[in-house]
Amino acid sequence: MTQVLTQGFSRAGVEALSQLKGEPAWMLEKRLAAWDIYEQTPAPLGRRGDLGVMTRVARYKYDALVPYVANGAHANGHQPLPNWEAGLLVQRNSTVAARELDPALAAQGVILTDMDTAVREHADLVQRYFMTGVTPHDNKYAALHFAFWSGGLFLYVPKGVIIDRPVLARYLLDQAGGTNFAHTLIIAETGSQVVYIEETASSLPEGTTALFNGVAEIFAKDNAHVQFNSVQDFGPGIWNLTTKHGVPEKDGYIHWIVADLGADTTLANLGTTMAGSGSNGDIVGVLFATGHQFVQINTLSNHAALSTSAETYFKGVLDDQARVDFEGLIKVAHGAQQTNSYLSDHTLLLSDEARAEAIPSLEIAANDVRASHGATTGQIDAEQLFYLMCRGIPEDQARRLIVQGFFEPVLDKIPSGELRARLRSSIVRKMTKGQQVMDESDWHDVTDQWDIEGAGAEAVAIYGGDE
Amino acid sequence: METQTPIQTAELVIRNLHAKVEDKEILKGVDLTVRQGEIHALMGPNGSGKSTLANVIMGHPKYEVTEGEILFKGQNVLDLSADKRARLGLFLAFQYPASVPGVSVANFLRRALESVREGYDPNAPAQPNGQMDKRKALPPAEFRKLLQEKMQILKVDRTFINRYINEGFSGGEKKRAEILQMAVLQPQMAVLDETDSGLDIDALKIVSDGVNALTGPNLGILIITHYPRILGYIKPSQVHVMYQGRVIKNGGPELALELEQKGYEWLTGSPDENGEAKA
């Protein structure tokens, strides 16, 4: 049972998709409204003199893609829920292949399902929140997402419910010319808590491409706490365009931890609107780009209420001909007094041909504000390298140690030990250009040496099984 | 001794060594020999080229050797990178060691020890789980035991090994960390570059005791110092005086005493701090 839409994006394609899904009229209306905005919005080409990531995104041949490829429900990728996870969702290309929720949580009123099901079964909640955290007006690619979204995760955590184990989503792409338009909607009611981990991966035939265009909308009501972890580990050929936005209400907290490691081209829009007084939105970012990877990261800390705080902290390592454009914005609305907001981006260049630019900026319309931003870009320090080599450590290993050390402070800010270990092994693998599988001594880098953290073998992949 | 016939005693022979940095010649024909088991002191006023010599011995890429040779174990090391010189048994205790944020002392030392162990092959392919022989990976327990033993000698606090290399270390902690590394790596020829500078008398004693605990027939030491003070704790058999890029005088321990009484002017004919390029 394979259903496929015709190649290319069109208004007729939007209608066909909605019909195929048997959606209510209100969702088709939202899709069509988004499609109109997509068509009316010119492709953003970036700033004058930037590194050209946006231009590359704009020139991508979107019409060669198939907007929807159904692989059949539960055809592949179904994995039983390991007992340390609260819930799980797996999506392959356009459709969800597996989902599970701990029955004990379901009994407490927690809802975990795919978005298509949520549209049918939880229309009131979806109608209230969908397309309000992120809108088609935010950027052209978000508009495309809202026109063609398919699958994704819907998570509702009722008032006061604290989920003590992570909820996991895995988004996969293995169809040449295929797409994954996963939509993530998380609603954490008053006083609730949840940790969400999203992992993306792909395997494409060589020389082919596929598109991941994901949107995440996160709502943390009064005093709710959402930790959103994202590990983007796509293989070659993937165009990865994402828009994620969180809205914490009074004393709510949304904590983003994002790692971008793979994909040919990444455009990541990530932000928080502190909508309630005392709310907080932190972003911790880890970036490692090699080869011809192009990355554009746009962050926003939008302070719209009294006494809110946010810290954005990114660290990136670039090798080969990689290019990273980082634009970070702190915005403080009129009347958003007692704001604390910090933004920093640090980049280490391992190659003379790698390029990085960071443009932090402030728009402040209140007067009782503490805000600062900073960005650094540098190369491996020759004295550090000589020092390590003087102790017998060969140059390539010494460089690896320095890179590990560079990442360490940002990894330190990641609450989950499993995730830290997972990222350490990804970084080691990437530094050795994938030539080297994790061997015993690299393993010590990750566990005993790099940090005495006690990661077990299961820490290499968040998921028990291999794809 | 010929370069073609390597010998196994770890002897450091420096012959007519010239080196420059950014077109400025700093070493202008250094001759010096230190044999295994001997302790030598290299003294001289600031800017005489002592620290440059230490860095050139280890192969700092900033310096260009224009003439002469450095032989260790009968092998000319000038074409070797710093890590290869270290694996051959050379060690430099830095005057101003670099800090490496995010890399713990334990992590670093273990990797370093693996590297200098005999039979280490940096190009050996990764082995499947459990086969560590080619890379000489050290069992963590064995390494910790060794490290704790050496830390006791240098009176180093236990928390020290989890700190990042030299990051936020006091002057004394940096010097002790250098000697701790020397104790763990067990080189055959160690150059101690101004290891006494910036140390109070208690720290100087601890560091000197640490060095003395390592001395023996297998270790040659070249102590580079501006002040004779450390030579009250570590006794050299030979003393050399360096000035304007050359060794201008060689003698026994009595030479250090003479310098203490008379200063360098006695030999150089000009006051100390004479504006020569600092190494």
Image (cartoon, coloured by chain):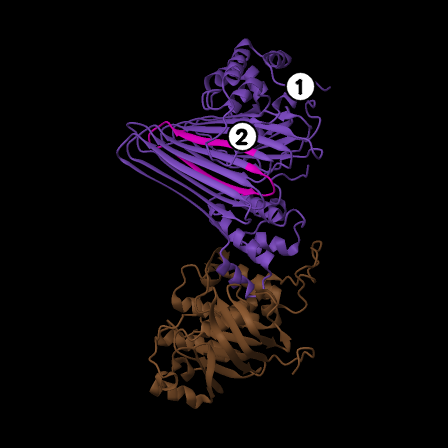
Chain colours: A purple, B brown
Q: Secondary structure at mark 1?
A: loop
Point out the image quarter for the N terminus of chain A: top right
Q: Amino acid at mark 1?
A: Gln
Query: x and y percent of residue B74 in the render?
Result: 64, 78
Instruction: Please state the total of marks drawn on the protein image.
Output: 2
Of A467 and A192, nearer the camera is A467
Sooner in the amino-acid sequence: mark 1 or mark 2: 1
Q: What residue span does the magenta drawing correspond to?
A: A266-294
Query: x and y percent of residue A189 in the render?
Result: 44, 26
- Camera sees residue B184: no
Please report, as a chain letter, where disc 2 is located.
Answer: A
Majority SS type along the magenta span: strand
- Camera sees residue A352: yes
Q: Is residue A62 magenta?
A: no
Q: Amino acid at mark 2?
A: Thr
Residue at 52% across, 11% down: A29
Q: Is residue A282 magenta?
A: yes
Residue at 51% across, 71% down: B19
Residue at which label 1 appears: A7
Residue farthest along the left direction in this orientation: A367
Tag of residue A55: 2
Residue at 38% across, 83% down: B268
Quadrant assignment, res A145 = top right
Does A395 appear above or below A197? below
Point out the image quarter for the C terminus of chain A: top right
Of A104 and A86, nearer the camera is A86
Please report, as a chain letter, where disc 1 is located.
Answer: A
Does B71 appear above or below A235? below
Question: Callout 1 environment at 10 Å: few (<14), some (14 to 19), or many (20+)?
Answer: some
Query: x and y percent of residue A367 in the render?
Result: 26, 33
Of A370 and A298, nearer the camera is A298
